[in-house]
Image (cartoon, grey):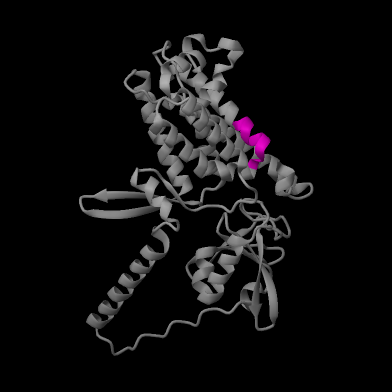
Amino acid sequence: MFLCPRCREPLEKKTTGGQSVFACPTCGGLAMGWSLVRHQIQPSIANKLWQQARCEQRREGAPCPACRRHMALVPVDVPAGQMFLDVCPTCYIAWFDTKEWETLPHQPPPIPREPELSSAAKEAIALAKLKQLQKREELDTELPDQPWQWIPAALGLPVELDGPMLRCWPWLTWSLVALCCVVYALTFHDIAAFAEQLGFVPKDAFRYGGATLLTSFFLHAGLFHLIGNMYFLLVFGDNVEDYLGRLRYVLMLMLGTALGDLFHAIGDPRSDIPCVGASAGISAVIVFYGLQFPNAQLGLFFRIWYVFRWIRFPAYLGLFGWLLLQVANAYFQTLGITNVSALGHLGGATIGAIFWFVWRYYDSLEQLFGGISSPQDRQ
């Protein structure tokens, strides 16, 4: 449910020109998706507003009607002077107080077509415009911004094309990645022996007082196992650390790893084989990211014969596909025909979902009783 950032009243859905907007019945404010704003106001102003909103580090605007976090407050020049608009880059939503929407310079209405044009001419014009829009969409939205993103994409890994802005340096995520790499460098010469000693063994789940529920996080069975896990932790962990704060973030990783190990012990028939890897804890991070930032844009690079193409999709859709894949793999794991612990992934995913529900409720209370804390307060 969308709430008015001024009156805290539920917004009413209305349709304007075939597009949906959300209006406050009390103060008359409007919440609009950014795609509608971009097509209605002058392109130069829309592009400038969006770039300023994405680059704005301090969020001093009104609470977002969707996620309740403070929006970016960006200035815009209008004929009457200058005014400030509230834009949420995370949810792709703009908020307009009374009369602000009407004050913005809108695009001129389209020039009506000449009535004497034949049907063939109209069809040719429509096809030309369609090709132009398709080409522009491909160039503007599909390709990644950073050249290095082509490397993981070529390996079949998802790429974060347009994610939420960071408020703090994610040094805890970087430190965990560095620590896992150091542990691998020290153990790869005899990983089987270290896995027997410090990995999670289902038939002896609480060895060393249960310490192996956590030490298994830092061990990896091979180089590609390590690279895959660390890539997902780097891509999604920085935003989750930034949102939750470091103490809550590391607690979620620990609980996700522990519950993932227990899920593995319950369902995997091979109770004497050690389980290692950070993927259960990282699964908690993936689920939290997909739920908290559902509109973040991800991309996959694929090839069909000699056709290469990028697929762009929102994070919530990627999370749904990932969960379906884990459920299918968990079934094969119970049959003992896969070495990947999808049950461990589902255990970690459960913790990620719980943390999202808990801290979303916590932030709603914080919003109600005194506003959202600063990034420094979240550490």
Q: Is residue 308 above or below residue 41?
A: above
Q: Residue at x 62, y 36 (%)?
A: 249
Q: Residue at x 34, y 88 (%)?
A: 114
Residue 7 x %, y %:
73, 58
Q: Residue at x 34, y 43 (%)?
A: 155
Q: What's the magenta bit mostly, secondary-structure-wise?
A: helix
**Residue 329 appears in the figure:** yes
Left or right: 86, with 130 as reference point: right
Residue 24 x %, y %:
66, 62
Q: Give the quadrant of residue 267.
A: top left
Query: On the rendered image, what quadrant is the C terminus found in?
Result: top right
Residue 168 x %, y %:
65, 48
Residue 119 x %, y %:
24, 81
- Residues 375 and 119: in front is 375
Residue sitting at the far right? 370
- Residues 256 and 25: in front is 256
Left or right: 33, with 96 as reference point: left
Residue sitting at the far left? 305
Q: Residue at x 69, y 44 (%)?
A: 363
Q: Is residue 2 above or below residue 45?
A: above
- Residues 141 and 291: in front is 141
Q: Is residue 131 above or below residue 319?
A: below
Left or right: 123, with 340 as reference point: left
Residue 251 is covered by the magenta coloring: yes
**Residue 349 appears in the figure:** no
Residue 57 is covered by the magenta coloring: no
Specify the segment rendered in magenta: 244-252
